[in-house]
């Protein structure tokens, strides 16, 4: 992990990430593969909807919970 504070993945947003949006594209990824986007509180819903309408969104988790599960 980097010492840098993770930032939101929304275009142009520089806010701290609060959420992890886990997703995959079933046309190109295996079912267990998870790619991630980070989101601030303001952009969580927008990014979730973007992934959701495409059928890509798998999970939305608080960043600190995701980080703890990755470390543990």
Image (cartoon, grey):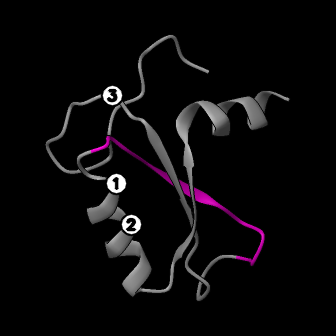
Q: Quadrant of residue 34?
A: bottom right
Q: Tell me: residue 12, above or below residue 68.
A: below
Q: Name the residue under label 2.
A: 48
Distance from the alpha carbon under mark 3 to that under mark 2: 17 Å
Instruction: Give the percent coordinates (x, y) of residue 68.
Output: 73, 29
Tell me the quadrant of the picture where the C terminus can be found: top right
> Is label 1 in contact with label 2 (beta carbons under 8 Å)?
yes
Tell me what residue is drawn at x 32 percent, y 74 percent: 50
Instruction: Give the secondary structure at mark 3.
Output: loop
Q: Mark 3 points at which residue?
A: 16
Tell me what residue is drawn at x 53 percent, y 53 percent: 36
Q: Which residue lies furthest to the right in this view?
A: 72
**Disc 3 or 2, which lies upstream in sequence?**
3
> Is label 3 in contact with label 2 (beta carbons under 8 Å)?
no
Q: Is residue 46 magenta?
A: no
Q: Residue furthest top?
A: 3
**Disc 3 or 1, which lies upstream in sequence?**
3
Distance from the alpha carbon under mark 3 to that under mark 1: 12 Å
Q: Mark 1 points at which residue?
A: 44
* Circle 1 residues within 10 Å: few <14, some 14–19, many ≥20: many
Distance from the alpha carbon under mark 1 to that under mark 2: 6 Å
Residue 62 or residue 72, whichever sits in front: 62
4 sits left or right of 45 in the view: right
Instruction: Give the percent coordinates (x, y) of residue 8.
Output: 32, 40
Q: In which quarter of the image is residue 45?
A: bottom left
Count of numbered circles in the view: 3
From which residue to which does the magenta span run? 30-41
């Amino acid at each position: 992990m980097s010492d840098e504070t993770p930032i939101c993945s929304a275009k142009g947003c520089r806010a701290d990430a609060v959420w992890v949006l886990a997703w995959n594209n079933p046309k190109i990824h295996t079912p267990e593969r998870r790619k991630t986007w980070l989101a601030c509180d303001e952009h969580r819903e927008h990014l979730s909807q973007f992934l959701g309408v495409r059928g890509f969104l798998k999970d939305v988790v608080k960043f600190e919970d995701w980080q703890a599960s990755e470390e543990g």
